[in-house]
Image (cartoon, rainbow, N blue to C red):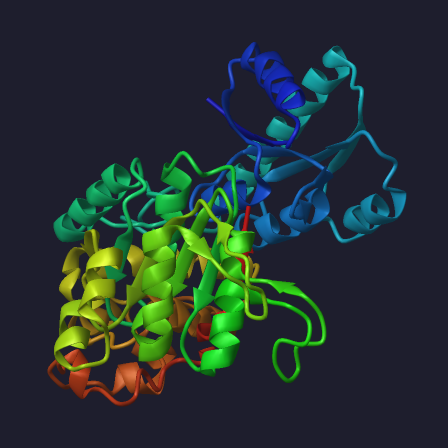
């Protein structure tokens, strides 16, 4: 059965399309939010995607450009009630979209168009399958939990806890080494919660002055401090009704921790330069590489704030402790990167698997993704097999025993895309 994804912020249009296409014996998935749909599309390949053009947060053409990077063989139909000719023509020219349909559509014509596109997808898949020679390769569509791919029992237990905890408004604290996917888990909590249709706002609390961090949290009035040239709302205001994720929360200065504690207790905050408090309604998630109990013992964190934030603790294992996942993630990420670079997937030498299983992965999943990006970027169209010589030098020459995380200084010399590791301090999705 063919799989079809529909993305449209209009509920009536979404359900009308779903009803129409289900009559064609198709497996239909649909989302109102293009960002949520994008998360699904990075881990699962659909045969056909139909998307609206004008949606909050992302245009359909932008959505398709990102999808194309993961699964270029997926057929893409843009549908819109507006004549966005410039965007549409540009998308046609660079092959971002395959067909454009203007609302209101003709049901018979649309069903015919969908059938034609699915036939083209089948023909393309048959052609691509002749280029792949990987005995025992894992299938591209790996089951995942909001983009988190795992078969590790400990990780699966934590994701089960995530699913349960998301149903409440109790604060959740996520601990784990750098690169284990703390923000990804936070987003999964948001998507599993009743607040999924509202904003997800993330703030990295590290490397900010106390005044700037306070301003980012609570907002400020014009003239409240040097450089405050205009009124600015903080992340608490932006996340209203949704989810606020405070990353590296142990980096918050002690004096500001006291203010944050009061805000969480009273469920109200006061922007810098104002005197009137504002009520707020957000689900608060927080995270750090250092667990809060240790931070309290080291005098870096208030114990009362710890109890306020860590109602439900979630602990993410390091990649080296997820032995069953290392090959799974390596195969999955490498196949995705090869496809993204327009390359056919090739066999992987057994010695490569032996190397990645014994490597310590100090940068965890983030480092593994960087390694896969490195391999695909340098592979070239004439690559016939992935061997040890294709690995980054730091990984290929590694012969040590995994060090405790606290003793590591260099995250990884193999991070060819180290700049990509640094996420923006504030990320929004809604």
Where in the figure is residue 230, as x and y percent of width and height?
71, 70
* Front-most of residues 300 and 400: 300
Q: Is residue 149 left or right of residue 416?
A: left
Q: Camera-side residue: 364 or 395?
A: 364
Q: Residue at the location (26% across, 90% down)? A: 409
Q: Is residue 379 visible?
A: no
- The correct choice, above or below, for 80 with respect to 43 in the image is above
Could you say which quadrant of the image residue 272 lies in? bottom right
Q: Residue furthest bottom?
A: 409
Left or right: residue 144 compared with residue 98: left
Residue 320, given in percent of the width and then of the height, sits at 18, 68
Left or right of 22? Residue 315 is left
The residue lying toward the viewer, choosing from 87 and 165, is: 165
Q: Is residue 250 left or right of residue 36?
A: left
Identify which residue, 374 or 66, lies in the foreground: 66
* Res 323 quadrant in image: bottom left
Residue 76 image offset from top left, x and y in percent: 66, 38
Q: Which residue is painted at 78% across and 34% down in the image?
A: 100
Q: Is residue 208 above or below residue 149?
A: below
Residue visible at 84% across and 34% down?
82
Whether residue 6 is visible here, answered yes or no, is yes
How many numbered marks, from 0 up? 0
């Amino acid at each position: 059965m063919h799989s079809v994804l529909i993305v449209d912020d209009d509920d009536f249009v979404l359900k009308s399309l779903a009803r129409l296409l289900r009559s064609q014996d198709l497996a239909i998935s649909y989302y109102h939010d293009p960002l949520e749909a994008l998360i699904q599309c990075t881990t699962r390949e659909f045969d056909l995607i139909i998307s609206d053009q004008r949606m909050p947060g992302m245009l359909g053409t932008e959505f398709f450009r990102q999808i194309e990077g993961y699964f270029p063989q997926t057929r893409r139909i843009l549908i819109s009630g507006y004549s966005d000719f410039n965007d549409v023509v540009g998308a046609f020219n660079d092959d971002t979209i395959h067909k454009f349909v203007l609302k209101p559509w003709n049901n018979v014509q649309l069903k015919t168009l969908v059938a034609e596109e699915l036939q083209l997808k089948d023909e393309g898949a048959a052609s691509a399958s002749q280029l792949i020679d990987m005995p025992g390769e894992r299938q591209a569509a790996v089951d995942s939990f909001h983009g988190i791919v795992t078969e590790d029992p400990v990780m699966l237990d934590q994701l089960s806890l995530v699913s349960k905890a998301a149903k409440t408004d109790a604060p959740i604290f996520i601990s784990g080494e750098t690169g284990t996917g703390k923000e990804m888990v936070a987003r999964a909590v948001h998507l599993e919660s009743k607040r999924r249709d509202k904003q997800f706002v993330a703030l990295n609390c590290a490397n900010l002055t106390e005044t700037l961090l306070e301003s980012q949290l609570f907002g400020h009035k014009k003239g409240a401090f040097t450089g405050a040239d205009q009124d600015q709302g903080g992340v608490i205001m932006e996340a209203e009704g949704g989810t606020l994720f405070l990353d590296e929360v142990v980096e918050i200065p002690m004096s500001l921790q006291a203010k944050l504690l009061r805000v969480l207790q009273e469920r109200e905050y006061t922007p810098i330069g104002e005197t009137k408090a504002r009520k707020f309604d957000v689900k608060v998630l927080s995270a750090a590489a250092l667990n809060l109990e240790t931070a309290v013992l080291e005098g870096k964190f208030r114990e009362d704030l710890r109890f306020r934030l860590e109602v439900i603790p979630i602990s993410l294992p390091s990649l080296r402790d997820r032995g069953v996942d290392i090959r799974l993630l390596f195969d999955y990420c490498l196949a995705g990167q090869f496809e993204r670079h327009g390359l056919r997937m090739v066999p992987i030498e057994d010695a490569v698997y032996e190397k990645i299983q014994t490597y310590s992965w100090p940068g965890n999943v983030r480092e593994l993704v960087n390694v896969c990006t490195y391999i695909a970027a340098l592979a070239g169209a004439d690559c016939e097999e992935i061997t040890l010589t294709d690995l980054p030098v730091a990984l290929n020459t590694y012969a040590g025993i995994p060090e405790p995380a606290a003793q590591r200084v260099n995250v990884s010399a193999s991070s060819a895309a180290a700049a990509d590791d640094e996420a923006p301090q504030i990320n929004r999705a809604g």
